[in-house]
Image (cartoon, helix red, strand yellow):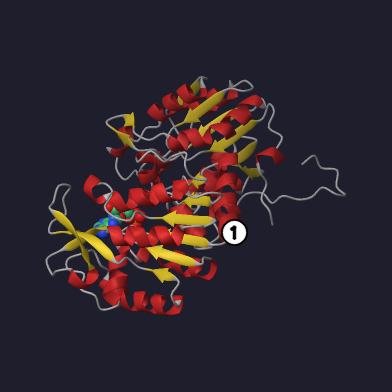
Amino acid sequence: MKKKTLEDLHVSGKKVLLRVDFNVPIIDGVITDDNRIVQALPTINYLIDEGAKVIMFSHLGRIKKAEDLPKNSLKVVAERCSELLGKKVKFVPVTRGPELEEAIAKMKKSEVLMFENTRFEDLDGNKESKNDPELGAYWAGLGDVFVNDAFGTAHRAHASNVGIATHLESAAGFLMEKELKYIGDTVENPQRPFIAILGGAKVSDKIGVIENLLKKADKILIGGGMAYTFMKSQGFNIGTSICEDDKLDLAKKILEEAKGKIVLPIDVIVTKEFSADAESHDTTYKHLKDDEMGLDIGPKTIKAFKKELKGAKTVVWNGPMGVFEFEKFAVGTRAICETLAELKDARTIIGGGDSAAAAIQMGYADKFTHISTGGGASLEYLEGKELPGVESLSDQHECVDCNCNH
Ligand code: AMP
């Protein structure tokens, strides 16, 4: 069943509860990447233009003890959001109680309010993260309708998404809709050739994705730390490179089942120590020494991956090709960005998390069809799993015979 989207709701004059994902990186009180706020602006602006009373909320970081509270306050995020909107966002520094209820009661049409980090409720028994029914019902009682635009947490059933949706008419916001469309449609109905690129640290995080994409993609290119488990499973010496020894049998089985669909690296950039300015050189797997570790794919692999990507019409990428945080070992990841940016008439989707961060940091933010705002959520969606934050939204129905105004 299709889910309701923003335009299915009547929002004028209504108190609209808007769950956003403003879990942005903050260093010393400064937001270092506001992409998630920027991506939510179309939904917020639509609600403002439609005359809704916009009540926004999000999680930020993790809250385990009282000392975690100040550094995870959404105040600085509300200020940034206000700057980007060019409109006042009233920040209410609590998650419940009279101060919040009175502020909402005073709201006029097209005004925007943001309340404090939903995870502040985790301090006392993980109420938000465990989807405490009382909390979901309380938040739902603050509004008339619910819009969920937080794709980044859609793979979790929390009080601020599933909990609220249980009680109110609920719809996907524009960003949520875009994420589902790009990731879902792309994987289900790809134009071919469809190439997937997977990297990052561990195989274990991406087993489900590999298995699902093996059924859908024409080729899967594997780089990054996870490649070493595959290479070791084929009998290569990987020295001190990152490896999950308990996944060797699985890696071997996946390669057998893939019947040539998986393309592994040929060469690697090796070093003797894990540091930004370590001595390094290119070597093939055959010649990798016991005391060396691979931190990036090498030039022959880049060339081979470029050849595979030539003419691709659909590309889904999740996980960097190397330790891109060290400039020296960011070459493979940058080469993938460059190659995808140059593809003509191709749909290029970057899963959230580190590959998205790398692409944005390297200046490719607007060079792809879509960069997901969700790390774990995009992985689970790529695995073909249902996302509770989406499943809990109201179903769309076709008002053929009924007189309802939906
Ligand atoms: P993930 O969150 O699984 O996508 O993993 C991203 C992390 O994988 C990044 O922090 C990279 O530094 C790391 N990574 C990528 N390649 C390697 C490698 N060859 N050795 C160790 N870590 C790696």
146 left or right of 329 in image: right
Q: Nearer the viewer, residue 123 or 330?
A: 330
Q: Does ligand 1 reach within 8 Å of label 1's beta carbon?
A: no
Image spot of residue 348 (x, y percent): 50, 50
Q: Is residue 361 above or below residue 224?
A: above
- Residue where numbered disc 1 is placed: 191
Q: Quadrant of the N terminus?
A: bottom right
The amino acid type found where label 1 is placed reads Gln
337 left or right of 215 in image: left
| Residue drawn at 39 percent across, 76 percent down | 255
| Res. 245 image quadrant | bottom left
Secondary structure, mark 1, is loop
Image spot of residue 319 (x, y percent): 37, 55
Q: Nearer the viewer, residue 240 or 10?
A: 240
Residue 374 visible in rendering = no
Q: Give the residue furthest to the right.
A: 401
Residue 266 visible in rendering = yes
| Quadrant containing ligand 1 | bottom left
Image spot of residue 296 (x, y percent): 26, 57
Q: Quadrant of the C terminus?
A: top right
Image spot of residue 359 (x, y percent): 39, 44
The count of marks equals 1
| Res. 262 image quadrant | bottom left
